[in-house]
Amino acid sequence: MKRRIILEDGEVYAGEAFGGGGERVCEVVFNTSVVGYQEIVSDPSYTDQAIVMTYPLIGNYGMAAEDYESDAPSAGALIVREYNGEPSNFRAERTLGEVMEQYGIPGVSGVDTRRLTRSIRDKGSRRALITDRDISPAEAVKIIKSAPVPKDAVSRVSGGEIRRFPAENGRFHVVAIDCGMKKNILRSLNARSCSVTVVPWNTRAEEIEKLKPDGVFISNGPGDPEDVPGTVRTVRALVGKYPIFGICLGHQIVSLAYGGETYKLKFGHRGGNHPVKNLETGKIEITSQNHSFAVRPESLAGTRLTVTHVNLLDNTVEGVRCDADRVFSVQYHPESAPGPQDSAYLFDRFVELMEG
């Protein structure tokens, strides 16, 4: 079955349908990863986004039960050059298309993904209509313009109740604020003897204090960090009381809690090959990233935060810290799986702060 992608400026890309069905409007972004499509599709940070994979062959190793980053994938759509629905992998239990069909995620294959990626790079991320109907670009643009921009992504992917993940020989108790947390963050903390209590995104500071944590973690998640002012207030109230570690959206929330500002990037950072310089050591880390927003560096002047990492592609802020408050955060994903492992030391740093 034919399926089309019509961007809000009238650009049209045609392909074939796989995965789920239905018409939807979502922001189109690109990811430069070579592997990891299962983790990408199941990452809650991609909620409502249509992901263009720049690597041409997707689906060839299938889907394995232990590799999901969330229980219910919520990506907007997946756009690929070539889809392989007959995976060759002894770990594969289902095909990518079957999982996307189960969760209602439409896929489009046979697309000129190089042309589409260049368009996003040159003109920026835009919204698009993904449809099986034969409608004109003008009609599609009207549908896109009339569709509201979702502001509730975090509330839709955050767990609605407290969940506990004990670690074997647990030495520390971490309370993790779930804004759309990836499973491998839990695995990374558990592997370091941290038992984790996961609380919803809108949990108040006093409720977290009653749980008596040794440290507080703020997770990744979808959307604009300014859509969750309550979480920012919670973190602001906890600053100085516990060691705090934030990743991705959590990094942006930490920066906002200290009085910083965020802004939307032209096309965001997505993929497992972004070079980041650690200003403390001078070393370059190859990182995995997935975000549309960044911290405005000039807004940190006058705050108690120090910039610790910068992106070498566009000089954006990739990490901040406040030693006095035992707070630090990074924009990228040290828990990425699969992905670069250069930044796994950040979880060790969090443990060291709790030991102190």
Image (cartoon, rainbow, N blue to C red):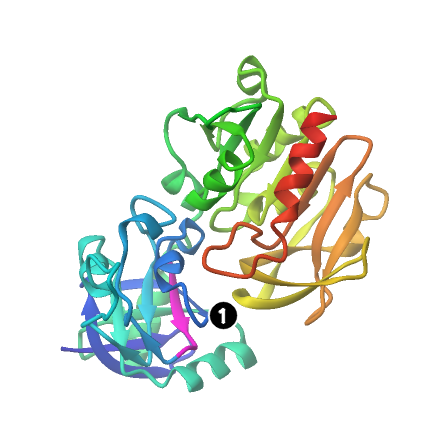
Q: Is the magenta stretch mostly helix, strand or loop?
A: strand
- Estimate how packed mark 1 is, as few (under 14), some (14 to 19) or many (20 or more) residues with alpha carbons within 10 Å: many
**Residue 7, image x, y percentages:** 38, 75
Q: Is residue 130 depicted above or below 235 in this figure?
A: below
Q: Left of 332 or right of it: where is 178?
A: left
The one nearer the camera, 14 or 86, is 86
Q: Residue at x 43, y 86 (%)?
A: 115
Measured as percent of width and height from the top left, residue 175 is found at 53, 27
Horizontal arrangement in the rendering, residue 350 relative to residue 211 (left or right): right
Q: Work out whether residue 267 can be spotted.
A: no
Q: Quadrant of the C terminus?
A: top right
Q: What residue appears at the point 66 percent right and 36 percent down from the top-left corner?
A: 350
Which residue was labeled with disc 1?
A: 125
Compared to 270, does 4 lie above or below? below
In the rendered image, residue 316, in percent from the top left (x then y), is placed at: 70, 62
Left or right relative to 334: residue 69: left
SS label for mark 1? loop
**Residue 97: x and y, percent?**
21, 65
Whether 253 is drawn above or below 340: the answer is above
Q: Which of 55 and 249 is in front in this view?
A: 55
Query: Residue 14 falls in which quadrant of the image?
Result: bottom left
Res. 69 visible in picture: yes
The amino acid pointed to by label 1 is Ser
Q: Does the magenta stretch include residue 334?
A: no
Front-most of 238 and 333? 333
Relative vertical location of residue 101 with respect to residue 10 in this rendering, above or below: above
Magenta region, residue range: 49-55
